[in-house]
Every structure is written in C-alpha cells, then in structure tokens.
Image (cartoon, rainbow, N blue to C red):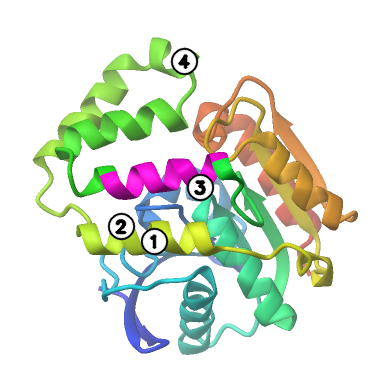
Amino acid sequence: MPVVQANGIELHYTERGTGEPLVLLMGLGGDGSLWEEHVQAYERHFRCILVDNRGAGRSAKPEGPYTTAMMAEDTLGMMDALGIESAHVSGISMGSAIAQEMALAAPQRIRSLTLNCSWMSCDAYTEAIFKTFRAAYGNLRPDDFARLLQLIIYTPQFHANQAERLAAAREEAQSSAERMPAHAFQAQCDACMSHHTTDRLGAIKVPVLLTVGDRDMFTPLALSQAIAAQLPHARLEVFEGSGHTHHWDAIERFNTVTMSFLLDNKS
C-alpha cells in the first residue's frame, strides 16, 4: 500500500501513468479512487498521483481541526516524499480549495492549476450547506445521508436518468464497513467553511483553468466567476445543464477540456 509520511501523518496515494506529474485532489468525503474515470484519460500523458486527503480513504484520520492550508501542506509533503519538485494540480470542490492554498504557499512547485467547482470563500448559502452536511453526517443512516448528498450535488435530470445508479450508491453507502468516521468528515467540513483566499488569489501566476456547472446548487457559478475576476489570465469553462458533478455529468467533455489544458501547459 503506497503511503508516505507527510506533515506529521500517513498519507495514502495511488500512482498511474508516466510523464509530468499531475496531482489529483478529490472533494469532501471522497478518496483518490473517485478520479478513476478521469485518470483513464490522463494516465496516457501524465504521471497521475491520486491522493486520499487527510481524513479520507486510507490516509490518517486525526482529530480536527483541519484547514485547507493544512491539507495543502500534507500534499506538498507528499510531493517531497516522492521527489516531485513541481506538478500540475487539479482539484474538485474541496480539492480545488486545497489546490489554491498549494499554489499560494509554494508557487514555484505548481506547473498549472485546474479548479473544478471551486470557491475562494463561502457565501452564506454554501456555508449553510456545509453546516447541514456536518450535522447530518453523524445523525443520519449512511443511505439517508447519501440521499441528501445526491439531492445537492446532482441535477434533477441526472436523478431522472440515473435513478438506478443513485440507488446503488445509497445501498453501497449503507452496506460499507469502511465509512469515513464522523469526526474526520466534520473536520473536512470545517476546513471547507474556513477556506478563505479572497484578495490573495491575484498572486497566482501559473495557468489556471476553472470548470463549473451552471446548475451547481452547492458551489454556484457565481463563486467560480468571482475567482475568475481575480485571475484575469484564467480560463473559465461553464458546463451548461450540469451541476456540482459536471465532471461526471458531462465526463467526455470534461476530460477533453481538462486534457487539452494540461497538454497545452506541458513543459
């Protein structure tokens, strides 16, 4: 099992492919394996490093508090342990917040930045969603929590077209013996709510791609537009008809757009 010591904890990761390093950071509650449908494309051109963030997957799950800056230091420490001087970094949701902090803490180590369904600070609406998730995780049955999560991150159309897939995910959540501990999930929620890079993002000079669904109920389009306003060199790609999971709702387009950006910024 590939594990490194980074920032005082054990951090689990998986490697796929060869080429320039590409660090992949998943969102709240997720582990690196959720990148699978994207890595199948990326690994043809990049050395992909799929990270289990602090609290998730097979990585350590210490008590909180967690912050996105702390998790950025975890990831930079992992890069140190693997001998990676610099890498492309792509993050989904919470992973994108971690990626922002990496670019601010160690700009020389970031080759390009892909921020998917991102935010630089929570507005009142998004903070309320994180608070709801935080409270619900420890009080609902796993399948009921999965249903709540699905209502927020998937569009009505996805629910109509993929009902069996969503039901299977709820059943898997209920039967899994490896559910993320409540303290770790809640600490990740706290990290998301306290994330704040407003007025700092202008320091990021590397190429940046922003992707977001125009029907994202969780981290709405306006939050990505606010980041783009601070990063005039960034490219903003809006996925019409998609929600927070635009990277799965429109996977072929997502993989094409992100791969094109990564290839354009190879050394």
- Image position of 180 with respect to 130: above or below: below
SS category of the residue bearing label 2: helix
Q: Residue furthest right?
A: 232
- Image position of 224 with respect to 76: above or below: above
Q: Are marks 4 and 1 in contact (CB under 8 Å)?
A: no
Viewport quadrant of the N terminus:
bottom left
The answer to which of marks 3 and 4 sits earlier in the sequence is: 3
Q: Residues under labels 2 and 4: Cα distance?
A: 26 Å
The answer to which of marks 2 and 4 sits earlier in the sequence is: 4
Q: Residue furthest front?
A: 124
Q: In this figure, which residue is indicated by the disc labeled 2?
A: 185
Nearer to us of marks 2 and 3 is 3
Viewport quadrant of the C terminus:
bottom right
Q: Which span of residues is magenta-colored?
A: 125-135
Q: In this figure, which residue is indicated by the disc labeled 1?
A: 188
Say few, some or many: other residues with alpha carbon within 10 Å of mark 4 (under 14 / 14 to 19 / 20 or more).
some
Q: In this figure, which residue is indicated by the disc labeled 3?
A: 127
SS category of the residue bearing label 1: helix
Q: Are marks 3 and 1 in contact (CB under 8 Å)?
A: no
Q: Residues under labels 2 and 3: Cα distance?
A: 15 Å
Q: In this figure, which residue is indicated by the disc labeled 4?
A: 156
Q: Residues under labels 1 and 2: Cα distance?
A: 5 Å
Question: Residue at point 13% right, 37% down?
Answer: 174
SS category of the residue bearing label 3: helix
Q: Residues under labels 3 and 1: Cα distance?
A: 13 Å
SS category of the residue bearing label 4: helix
Question: Residue at point 79% right, 65% down?
Answer: 199
The answer to which of marks 4 and 1 sits earlier in the sequence is: 4
In which quarter of the view is residue 185 placed?
bottom left
Q: Position of residue 181 (x, y in %)?
A: 20, 59
Query: Is 120 on the left-hand or right-hand side of 181?
Result: right
